[in-house]
Amino acid sequence: MIHPLLLASAVFIFGAILGSFLNVCILRIPLGQSIVNPPSRCAACGRRLPLGVNLPILGYFILRGRAHCCGAHLDSRYPLVEAGTATALTALWLLYPHHLFAIYALLVAGLIVASGIDLDYLVIPDALTIGGVVVGISLSYLVPSLQGKEDPVDAMIRSSLSAAVAGGSLWLIARTASWFLQKEAMGIGDAKLLAALAAFLGWQSLPFILAVSSLIGTIVGIGILKQRKQKLGVKVPFGPYLALAAYLWLVGGATLASKYLPNNFQ
Ligand SMILES: [Zn+2]
């Protein structure tokens, strides 16, 4: 028997290494570059990084935020993504049985990459959103308990319907808002991302995800307005808020809902 604490530490280290790979994905996917080849290079000067210099989380602090090769300033997002992935995965490991942990870890990895790209470019690639819908529906068939079902076909139907309802309703909200504001209020990418989330988490997660992401978006939006004195209506990425809300659903929202909502609502 391996001590549970040792296993959790292993998951944390795995998460940190995965996070450093997710950083590469965030940088390279929007540029259409391969995410495996070439191996890690300095984002500033392009030189190959010697092994050990790109140690997850710690590397940034050992190098004091500067590239080893050319002294270029390193984005503090790198260690944040690594530490965030490690922490997020460890919490899921402690909460869920192994097979669900594996699926949710994959979902969280996709969400972190989608959020990073959305922050940088204000778009989320279809490979992640539409791809997420396909993967979510397929995994529901393979692991029906993901949808709280025993029959694979039942689970797949539930996942597909959830994705359709989620994508459709957010698309409708976005269209209506755009019509009122006479400009694009919300990216269609957000609707596709919500569809992917629903394919994994089921439609019962939608009210929570929409409410919590709007709340976080409002709080952050007010903060940004106060800080930068930006004009209202500047396009902001909504993907990261959807992602964070989905994660909060995984680590507590679902339990809360099952406690306080009537059974027939689940
Ligand atoms: Zn360099």
Image: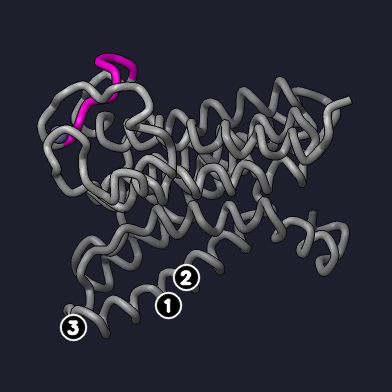
The x and y percentages for residue 235 are 23, 64
Residue at far top of view = 37
Give the camera-side residue of 89 and 72. Answer: 72
Image quadrant, ligand 1: top left
Task: Identify the mark at residue 229; answer none if there is no mark.
Answer: 3
* Residue highlighted by disc 2: 216
Label 3: how many residues lie within 10 Å, few (<14), some (14-19) or many (20+)?
few
Q: Residue at x 40, y 30 (%)?
A: 21
In the image, residue 104 above or below residue 2: below
Q: Is mark 3 within 8 Å of ligand 1?
A: no
Are the residues at dot 1 and dot 2 in contact (C-beta closer than 8 Å)?
yes
The amino acid beneath tag 2 is Ile
Q: CA distance from mark 3 to mark 2?
A: 19 Å
Q: Is residue 34 magenta?
A: no
Q: Residue at x 41, y 69 (%)?
A: 217
Q: Quadrant of the N terminus?
A: top right
Q: Earlier in the sequence, mark 1 or mark 3?
A: 1
Give the camera-side residue of 214 and 119. Answer: 119
Q: Secondary structure at mark 1?
A: helix
The x and y percentages for residue 103 are 64, 31
